[in-house]
Amino acid sequence: MNYTKLNDDNNQTCGYLSSFIPEDGVEEYQVILELTDGTLTYKEQINRLHKVFDNLRKGKLKNALPVITRYFLSDAANQLEELQDSINPQLTGAISIIEQPPLNGTKIALWAYLQTDMDIQLLDDGLWKATHSAFGHLWKGSATSREGDSEIQTKQLLNDYILNLNAQHCLLADNCIRTWFYVQNIDVNYSGLVKARNEIFHAHELTDKTHFIASTGIGGRNADPKTVVQMDAYAVQGISAKQIQYLYAKTHLSSTAAYGVRFERGTCVKYGDRRHVFISGTASIDYKGEVLWVGDIRKQTLRVWGNVNALLNEADCSMDDVAYATVYLRDVADYNIVKEMYDSHFPKLPIVIVLAPVCRSHWLIEMECMAIRADKNNQFDKF
């Protein structure tokens, strides 16, 4: 993985770009952008962020199109409308917008995943489809339901998504690779999400004896206060079971089912020319499912790195292959410590650190990431 530091002319916008550029085939880029001046107005911050992003897409990344762009906001109820008005209507790919305040003191940050040589189209059901070779990559962003509690909303979101997949001749169990669930007031509402997801998974042959789906379930707020759960998702049309490897790292982590939830710790998808590794939200946990280092943010951060690295190693990857990472903190006061640790150990990695409580109150930090590594496997079609 190649990394490039990004700065605008006034040094008011910064970030990092990761690049996966094979000898031939699809190039992949992931961008994290943040502001450096929290005193700018929200409108000024949006304009500067988009100016840098637009210049990247017109320059260094002129042959690449976004497949998903996620915005992290500090106050979605007051910021959503202005952001939506400022997004270029010609921007391709799924758009995800969530209130998870950037912890550097600014109002907005951005993660974007871009690829070259993709035919990208918006389908009637709201899915974005990126097509190359034998595969159709299906992205969904900011799916919501306003009625009922977290259990009811999760059921509605998943049932609607299953219909979306079915319309593309896909199944939840066979084709969905990754989900993100953002839960308002997670300490209260996470149990309803878990109950609904467990029931729907069981009904669709996602069980302890088969497999689950890589996922992040984390605190996050939609601009609409009636939306308790928001969902993003990624599926691959045309994929086969033999291309998918589920990651467990049993020396470091328990199964999620050990404490009543249902998702995969990580999933590796193998293509003829590369492999993608999706690491779910990962916290300071041991192989028994117990929280480690309660109250110690430094030791919890080190344990998170150890767990993530163990999962990556199982897919024959390492932190050197990571294209981006999102780090979630429960306590604003831990930001400076965590930022210093990441800057010291992973100075070039595209990373955003946001305020978002993890599903257990004793977990102070969680990290998710995606890795990409070159591969040569004639058994599978190229990406």
Image (tube, helix red, strand yellow):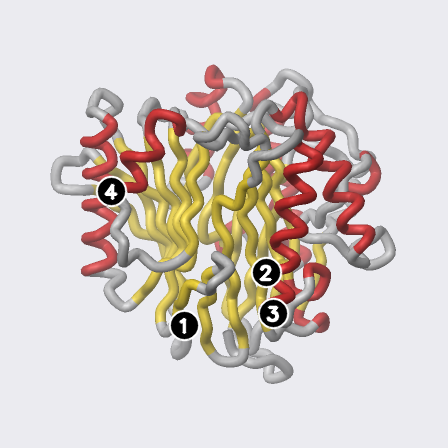
Q: Which mark is residue 166?
A: none
Between the residue at mark 3 and the residue at mark 2, the CA separation in whole angstroms equals 24 Å
Q: Position of residue 50 (x, y in %)?
A: 23, 44
* Residue extending furthest toward the bottom: 378
Q: Which residue is mark 3?
A: 270
In primary-sequence order, the first of circles 2 and 4 is 4
Is there a contact, CB below 8 Å, between mark 1 and mark 3? no
Residue 214's place in the image compared with 327, above or below, is below
- Residue at point 68% right, 19% down? 294
Q: Identify whether 224 is placed above or below 200.
A: above
Q: Which mark is residue 164?
A: 2
Residue sitting at x 50%, y 74%: 383
Q: Earlier in the sequence, mark 4 or mark 1?
A: 1
Above or below residue 328? Residue 32 is: below
Check whether the beta carbons of the residues at disc 2 and disc 4 lie within 8 A of each other. Answer: no
CA neighbours of label 3 inside 10 A, class few (<14), some (14 to 19), many (20+): many
Nearer the observer: mark 1 or 2; the answer is: 2
Read off the residue under disc 1.
26
Give, as a three-letter code, the residue at label 4. Ser
Residue 280, percent from left and from top = 62, 45
Does the CB distance between marks 1 and 2 fall below 8 Å?
no
Mark 4 sits on what residue? Answer: 86
Q: Amino acid at mark 3?
A: Lys
From the image, state whether disc 3 or disc 2 is nearer to you: 2
Residue 85, horizontal then vertical, whole percent:
26, 41
The answer for how far apart the CA atoms under marks 1 and 2 are is: 26 Å
On the rendered image, what quadrant is the N terminus found in? bottom left
The reply to whether residue 349 is in sight is no
